[in-house]
Amino acid sequence: VQLGWLPALGWYGPRWTVLPALALGLPAGAVLGRLLDDLLPSAFAEPWAQAAEARGLSGRTIAAKAVRRCVPALLPNLGLFVVGLTGGSVAVEQIYDIPGLGRTSLQAALAQDLPVLQAGTLALLILAATATGLTALAVRLLTGPALRDGALDSLHRPRRPARSTLPLVHGGLLTAVVALGLLRDPLALDTGARLQPPSWAHPFGTDALGRDLLARVGHGALDTLLTAVAISFTALVVGVLLGLLPRLSGPLVDTVNAVPPVLAALLVTAVAGSGAATPAIAVATVSWAALAAHTSSLLRQESATPHLTATRALGAHRWYLLRHELLPAILPSVTRHALLRLPGVALALASLGFLGLGTQPPAPEWGLLLAENQPYAERAPWAVLAPAAALALLGALAVSAAGGVRWRRRRARRQATTGECELPLSAGKLVETG
């Protein structure tokens, strides 16, 4: 924008689509990339890959087949991203002055223009139903009869946790910023020091009212960060529980995913009034849908593995299968997915604050800081970069910490006096039968 390479306002041609597309597509693509990275090692370890390597097939060919093997588990999330990006692009449309569907629905809701709001919501519901149908059809075409015949290998073998110092570095930096900010007064005004650049007295500079940005970022973390963690944990629990019941949660996921957080916030405001809790309730209402869809997708494929069929044939009951086979295979991947979505939850909270649907001034909420300082982005870029950098640091922490989430499956052991025996299976698992 500063160099004049790309236009940042309006919607008049292909050049105007680049920056909004990057703003929406990079976070979604990063999440899908990490989910694919989570599945690929097990795909390369499957017998077909080893046989292909023994036959002399090129590594590029094997890699392409491995990606194709992992795609069915990712397609449900890709369909949700299509709908979520369309309905959740209100903040991007507002920033780039784009007359899109999300912004039109928001303006209609604020103006109480019910026909336009109903038309926008109906369009999102139709898009959600179409995307879900197409992804379900694509999954069936890619998996073929293997899903029906229970001939899929598990893509969720136990692995050692990834060792990295990046989570400690990111967590230490974020903790230091918050701790130093908490020692300062976020509401102290100094009109003589308006929009001051970073200095020893104000490491992050000051805003348009002379308030210390480090103090406001640190105190705002208590609102944004803690709320995002609580919402992510709630979404993980609800998503896993509903994902284990795909017939019940399937239509509900499609409906909830078609409602962007902004419209959910407007509904909450209409029912309970505006306030600091409005963004949290709105984001929590819709954030579990992607995790439920991911859980259902993994459950469907894990249930079609031969070792589960053999365990079931040996007399294992449903609770045993769920506790010792399905949940240990599904939970680590879904938990990593929830961690990857933690920055998105924080950004959704910040977006609602940016649009004026959440915490009101002078509260130091990160989204509100972005909204307050956006008019001064060219004159004092540090006023916008400070809360944006805090959000980016939170994202780096969540992504780097997600790689260390693993679950070692425990072998079930019973005494002979209980009348149960242990039988080894081909995969090295143990099952108990009466």
Image: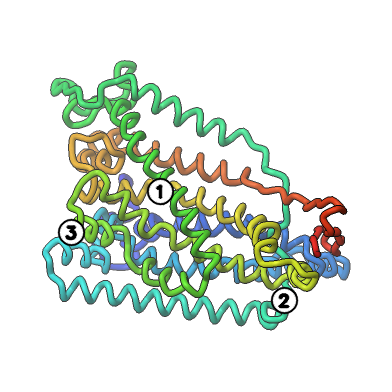
| Crowding at mark 1 (Cα within 10 Å: few <14, some 14-19, many 20+) | many
- Report the residue at 39% width, 36% height from top: 390
Label 3 vs 2, first from the N-terminus: 2
Which amino acid does the dot numbered 3 rest on? Ala
Q: Nearer the viewer, residue 166 or 375?
A: 166
Task: Say which mark, if any, is on residue 270.
Answer: 3
Secondary structure at badge 3 equals helix
Q: Is residue 24 above or below residue 399?
A: below
Secondary structure at badge 2 equals loop
Query: Residue 119 sits in which quadrant?
Result: bottom left
Query: Residue 254 sits in which quadrant?
Result: bottom left
- Report the residue at 71% width, 64% height from top: 154
| Disc 2 to disc 1, C-alpha distance | 36 Å
Q: Is residue 316 above or below residue 364?
A: below
Q: Is residue 258 left or right of residue 172?
A: left
Label 2 vs 1, first from the N-terminus: 2
Q: Nearer the viewer, residue 411 or 76?
A: 411
Q: Looking at the picture, how far across and down is residue 36, in whole percent?
A: 61, 59
Label 1 vs 3, first from the N-terminus: 1
Q: Which residue is mark 1?
A: 231
Image color mode: rainbow
| Crowding at mark 2 (Cα within 10 Å: few <14, some 14-19, many 20+) | some
Q: Which residue is mark 2?
A: 150
